[in-house]
Image (tube, rainbow, N blue to C red):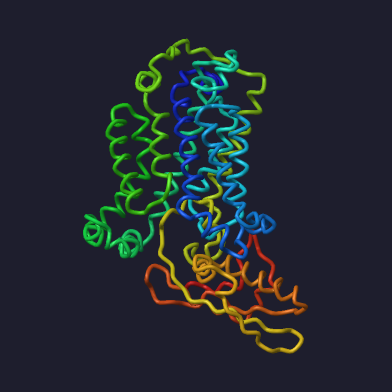
């Protein structure tokens, strides 16, 4: 295994990926400012729903989040040109992770992927060619890299796509009813809107998604099928970009193809002046056992995380326990109506609250259907009234519909959510059963 992992190969794919990755980091950060995402998600809300345990991580006051994202976009450009690469990459990783953890209202799997990749890219020698760092310090220049640099991406992608495919094997996806719901609000799309309402299209999307996610990595690995898989990947990701408008994820996914094609092809296309590495040396560093152990632990964690929902009671689609960090992408459509009743412990009186005074419309969607966000809002109400000198109880009535089915009660209305601790590794008993 050590000979396989530490055999050197041409590094053209990694070098070009760094350039694309930096550009996409820039576009994601700058685009969040230009499109108003930063304003809607981080500036307008009174507070944000962070990952539980990171409540202290809140947006900067005033308009400083604009500055924050502009700084991130600059780091993206520095990554692209390879200037102070490891510092720039580390700073982007830290800043992106902070914004990822501080808000869940716009949770998206590509945010999670970018968080993982950013830290992986810190340790990779992606600045050893075609970079300002090499211009300033020619001793850094290399035309090869250890084989593990390539397989780090391949294995990560295999885990991602395999779980994405497996998660779709449930009745509402297989009968295409979920897809039909997801397409319903896209009827006004120019040219394709009507086509997206067709039942045949829904089945093609449903089963095409399963097949693509399940087969794309194996097909890219084999030379005989690589070209066809790449063209299928272009169609699949451009379709997702147009229909679902999911930011940089489709283009980042296409950039991963650099690690599957022959390095000489990549060099000839993008780095014509670069020498092609053919020596096939095996250079095993002194820290090889530590490095291999870290990779094994890293991938075991990422294999285990998407399985954890099986250890919670009930259906993950209903409870959402184990939903995040699991590559469960665009699997369901949820809607709900939730009311929060605040009771003054001292008097027993009900204190009326207007949810519009606390949450933006975007946040209200999460506080209507997602159990963890509902619980967090109950905690926020408790803290808010504590500042006013009142000790309160918070009861919740939440009716939730999944995939267009009849609404059912999600939360036990007799449980005071303001005074119930969050269970990280155990099913929350205040969640009513789905059946």
Q: Is 152 located above or below residue 129 in the figure?
A: below
Q: Nearer the viewer, residue 343 or 356?
A: 356
Rendered residue at 67%/19% (across/down): 286
Q: Nearer the viewer, residue 139 or 326?
A: 139
Q: Position of residue 29 (x, y in %)?
A: 51, 45
Q: Is 421 located above or below residue 341 in the figure?
A: above
Q: Position of residue 235 (x, y in %)?
A: 29, 42
Q: Position of residue 174 (x, y in %)?
A: 32, 59
Q: Is residue 180 left or right of residue 279?
A: left
Q: Is residue 134 left or right of residue 404?
A: right
Q: Is residue 310 visible?
A: no
Q: Is residue 155 left or right of residue 50?
A: left
Q: Is residue 433 visible?
A: yes
Screen quadrant of the N terminus = top right
Rendered residue at 53%/51% (across/down): 325
Q: Position of residue 22 (x, y in %)?
A: 49, 34
Rendered residue at 38%/73% (across/down): 405
Rendered residue at 22%/55% (across/down): 191
Q: Is 8 located above or below residue 124 in the figure?
A: above
Q: Nearer the viewer, residue 94 or 109?
A: 94
């Amino acid at each position: 295994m050590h000979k396989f992992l530490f055999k050197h190969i041409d590094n053209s794919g990694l070098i070009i990926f760094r350039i694309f990755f930096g550009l996409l980091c820039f576009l994601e950060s700058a685009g969040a400012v230009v499109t108003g995402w930063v304003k809607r998600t981080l500036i307008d809300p009174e507070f944000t729903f962070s990952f539980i345990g990171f409540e202290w991580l809140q947006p900067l006051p005033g308009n400083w989040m604009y500055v924050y994202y502009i700084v991130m976009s600059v780091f993206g450009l520095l990554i692209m040109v390879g200037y102070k690469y490891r510092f720039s990459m580390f700073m982007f990783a830290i800043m992106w992770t902070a914004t990822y953890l501080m808000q869940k209202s716009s949770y998206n799997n590509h945010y999670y992927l970018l968080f993982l990749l950013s830290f992986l890219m810190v340790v990779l020698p992606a600045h050893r060619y075609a970079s300002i760092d090499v211009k300033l310090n020619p001793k850094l220049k290399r035309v090869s890299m250890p084989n593990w640099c390539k397989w780090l991406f391949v294995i990560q992608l295999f885990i991602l796509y395999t779980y994405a495919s497996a998660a779709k094997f449930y009745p509402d996806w297989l009968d295409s009813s979920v897809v039909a719901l997801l397409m319903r609000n896209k009827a006004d799309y120019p040219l394709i809107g009507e086509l997206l309402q067709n039942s045949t299209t829904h089945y093609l999307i449903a089963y095409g998604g399963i097949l693509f996610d399940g087969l794309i990595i194996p097909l890219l690995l084999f030379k005989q099928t690589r070209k066809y898989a790449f063209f299928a990947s272009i169609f699949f990701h451009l379709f997702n970009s147009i229909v679902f408008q999911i930011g940089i994820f489709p283009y980042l996914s296409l950039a991963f193809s650099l690690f599957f094609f022959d390095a000489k092809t990549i060099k000839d296309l993008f780095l014509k002046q670069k020498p092609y590495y053919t020596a096939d040396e095996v250079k095993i560093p002194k820290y090889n056992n530590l490095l291999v152990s870290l990779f094994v632990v890293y991938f075991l964690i990422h294999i285990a995380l998407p399985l954890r929902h099986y250890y919670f009671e009930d259906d993950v689609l209903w409870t959402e326990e184990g939903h995040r960090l699991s590559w469960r992408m665009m699997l369901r459509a949820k809607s709900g109506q939730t009311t929060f009743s605040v009771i003054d412990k001292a008097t027993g009186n009900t204190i009326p609250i207007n949810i519009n005074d606390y949450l933006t419309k975007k946040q209200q969607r999460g506080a209507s259907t997602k159990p963890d966000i509902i619980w967090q809002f109950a905690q926020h109400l408790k803290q808010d009234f504590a500042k006013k000198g009142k000790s309160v109880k918070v009861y919740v009535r939440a009716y939730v519909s999944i995939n267009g089915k009849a609404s059912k009660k999600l939360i036990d209305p007799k449980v005071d959510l303001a005074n119930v601790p969050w269970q990280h590794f155990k099913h929350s008993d205040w969640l009513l059963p789905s059946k």
